[in-house]
């Protein structure tokens, strides 16, 4: 696990310092806002991403007194808050995936037949995948996307969601099986590394 | 390429064109700029005492609150006690990606609407427009619980009686000479479901055109309770054939984003605030060649210019006599007016 560290100190140090100097909390924003925003943007789109990211940092600021100083890296903590904010928009997220699945393909650029076929195939798979994401349970989708899009490890995902690592593994397994089934058995390969 | 590769490709496709904006940074750190040092944490007992005390203070504050406003210049929920990113400042939003997402945003906005006390008034400013006629602008103050008089700025009779304890009352709660009893008619429309399942059923039973027209073309301006309005928009988000028009204008000349349906030979539009996603206007267009105005505008339009929560009807309002009898049912009478009962 890479610990966020700079002249300002670890995340835990920054949070502790912000208890006396609130302005120090902005260091945390500068470290993680881009990651959180990208994750939220992918899931709920431009319309809501700003709202949930702003609410995430406001909630984190309010709860900073309760942050465990033994955890030097606050990324999982912030993602956990973000996921709870996103949970209030699960219908929007599903709608985003369904809308994505309905989008017509732009049409491949002219080219060799095999490349055209590959591009058409990829467009079709995107729709299938988007529909499959919409159909996942919220818990399975959170695990899958924290691992795949949030780049969190299994332990970080477990910490973010407040569940055991074993549950993360089982949810990930179930989510991937669902995706593969939807994709028609597309090359099932290795699980992600913890 | 496996499922995770595809998922990552999809994620890359969905990435934002830019990083977080300066406006987002300002919102996210709004509390940081104003907060003082954190206080030491207290024990459980202290926290309980503080919670009880805070509840008492909030309850007192709610009791003396004057008016909560919701219009084009304020965010819904701007009076909430705790700082909130959604309430911090108006935010320019990009256009929604689809009508479905627009309606879900509108549902979320509806849920954030302030809720009045039973003894307050819903002050509704609206414009009704019918092709071939001069648009009619009016303001109405509706008693939230229906026990007080309703005041309309341009009705032939300015005051409509309230119904308190089974007695029809006029201004200042004075009983009228009607002795036949009455039933209070609350300011919000009450006959619609407040759950998504209930609204789905209603939509299925009545059909989209009939339901939307029933709700948005009332004889007098109407508001839905927040949960009902949210359920309606969520149900409409699931309706087939809905499409998005990102740049429309309502009867008040405001730009908006619209969800649009073709229903037989008419087109229905619900227009929303482009940033807050609150409802603004309903428009109905007849098909071309079937009576649509030459300028291409709507045949019917009912626009909610603004609404807010008031403690009283305007003072001093134009002089008007206290009604001496029950309101007569008909086009001129609001469905929210008290209904005399002869039981």
Image (cartoon, rainbow, N blue to C red):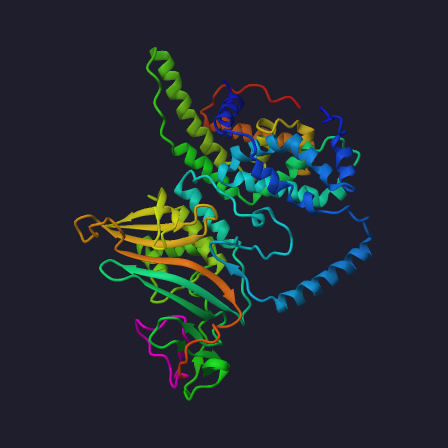
Q: What residue do we see at 41% from left, 43% from top?
A: B100
In which quadrant is the C terminus of chain B drawn? bottom left
Closer to us: B149 or A110: B149
Q: Position of residue B207 (x, y in %)?
A: 32, 54
Say which of B173 and A43 sits in front.
B173
- The residue lying at 32 percent from left, 58 percent from top is B213
**In the image, residue A193 above or below residue B225:** above
Q: Nearer the viewer, residue B22 or A30?
A: B22
Q: Is residue A20 visible?
A: yes
Magenta residues, dominant SS class? loop
At 36% from the left and 43% from the top, the residue drawn is B247
Q: Is residue B119 magenta?
A: no
Q: Which residues are magenta?
A: B322-342
Relative to A46, say whether B186 is above or below. below
Q: Is residue A171 visible?
A: no
How many numbered discs?
0
The answer to which image quadrant residue B223 occupies is bottom left
In the image, residue B339 lies in the stretch drawn in magenta: yes
- The residue positioned 36% from the left and 26% from the top of the image is A105
Q: In this picture, is A40 found above or below B206?
A: above
Where residue B341 appears, x then y in whole percent? Answer: 40, 81
Q: Is residue B282 left or right of residue B187?
A: left
Residue B251: x, y in percent? 34, 55
Closer-to-camera residue (A191/B278): B278
Query: Percent from the top left, x then y, of residue A99?
Result: 42, 36
Q: Quadrant of residue B132?
A: bottom left
B54 lies above or below A66: below
The outermost residue toward the left is B289
């Amino acid at each position: 696990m890479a610990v966020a560290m700079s002249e300002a100190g670890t995340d835990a140090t920054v949070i502790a310092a912000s208890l006396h100097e609130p302005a120090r909390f902005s260091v945390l924003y500068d470290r993680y806002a881009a990651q959180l925003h990208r994750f939220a943007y992918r899931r709920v789109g431009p319309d809501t991403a700003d709202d949930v990211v702003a609410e995430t940092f406001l909630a984190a600021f309010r709860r900073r007194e309760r942050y465990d100083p033994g955890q030097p890296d606050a990324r999982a903590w912030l993602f956990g808050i973000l996921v709870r904010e996103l949970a209030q928009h699960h219908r929007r997220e599903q709608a985003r995936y369904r809308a994505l699945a309905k989008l017509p393909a732009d049409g491949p650029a002219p080219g060799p037949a095999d490349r055209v076929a590959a591009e058409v195939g990829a467009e079709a798979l995107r729709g299938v995948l988007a529909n499959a994401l919409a159909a996942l349970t919220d818990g399975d989708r959170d695990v899958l996307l924290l691992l795949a899009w949030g780049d969190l490890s299994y332990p970080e995902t477990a910490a973010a969601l407040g569940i055991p690592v074993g549950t993360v593994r089982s949810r990930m397994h179930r989510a991937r099986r669902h995706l593969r089934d939807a994709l028609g058995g597309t090359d099932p390969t290795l699980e992600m590394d913890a | 390429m496996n499922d995770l590769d595809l998922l990552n490709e999809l994620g890359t496709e969905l990435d934002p064109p830019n990083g977080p904006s300066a406006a987002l940074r300002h919102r996210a750190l709004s509390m940081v700029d104003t907060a003082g040092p954190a206080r030491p944490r207290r024990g459980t007992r202290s926290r309980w005492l503080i919670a009880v005390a805070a509840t008492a203070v909030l309850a007192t504050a709610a009791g003396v609150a004057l008016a909560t406003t919701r219009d084009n210049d304020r965010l819904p929920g701007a009076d909430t006690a705790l700082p909130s990113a959604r309430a911090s400042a108006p935010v320019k939003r990009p256009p929604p990606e689809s009508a479905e997402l627009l309606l879900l945003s509108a549902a979320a906005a509806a849920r954030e609407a302030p809720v009045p006390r039973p003894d307050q008034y819903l002050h509704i400013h609206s414009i009704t427009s019918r092709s071939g006629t001069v648009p009619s602008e009016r303001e109405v103050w509706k008693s939230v619980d229906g026990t007080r008089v309703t005041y309309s700025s341009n009705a032939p009779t300015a005051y409509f009686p309230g119904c308190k304890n089974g007695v029809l009352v006029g201004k200042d709660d004075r009983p009228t000479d009607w002795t036949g009893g009455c039933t209070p008619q609350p300011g919000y429309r009450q006959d619609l479901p407040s759950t998504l399942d209930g609204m789905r059923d209603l939509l299925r039973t009545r059909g989209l055109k009939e339901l939307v027209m029933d709700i948005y073309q009332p004889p007098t301006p109407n508001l839905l309770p927040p949960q009902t309005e949210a359920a309606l928009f969520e149900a409409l988000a699931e309706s087939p054939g809905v499409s998005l028009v990102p740049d429309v204008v309502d009867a008040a000349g405001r730009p908006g984003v619209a969800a649009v349906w073709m229903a037989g030979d008419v087109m229905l539009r619900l227009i929303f605030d482009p940033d807050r996603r609150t409802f603004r206007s309903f428009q109905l267009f007849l098909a071309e060649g079937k009576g649509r105005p030459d300028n291409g505008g709507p045949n019917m339009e009912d626009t909610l210019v603004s609404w807010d929560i008031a403690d009283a009807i305007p003072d001093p309002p134009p002089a008007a006599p206290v009604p001496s009898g029950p309101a007569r049912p008909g086009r001129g009478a609001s469905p929210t007016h008290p209904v005399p009962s002869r039981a």
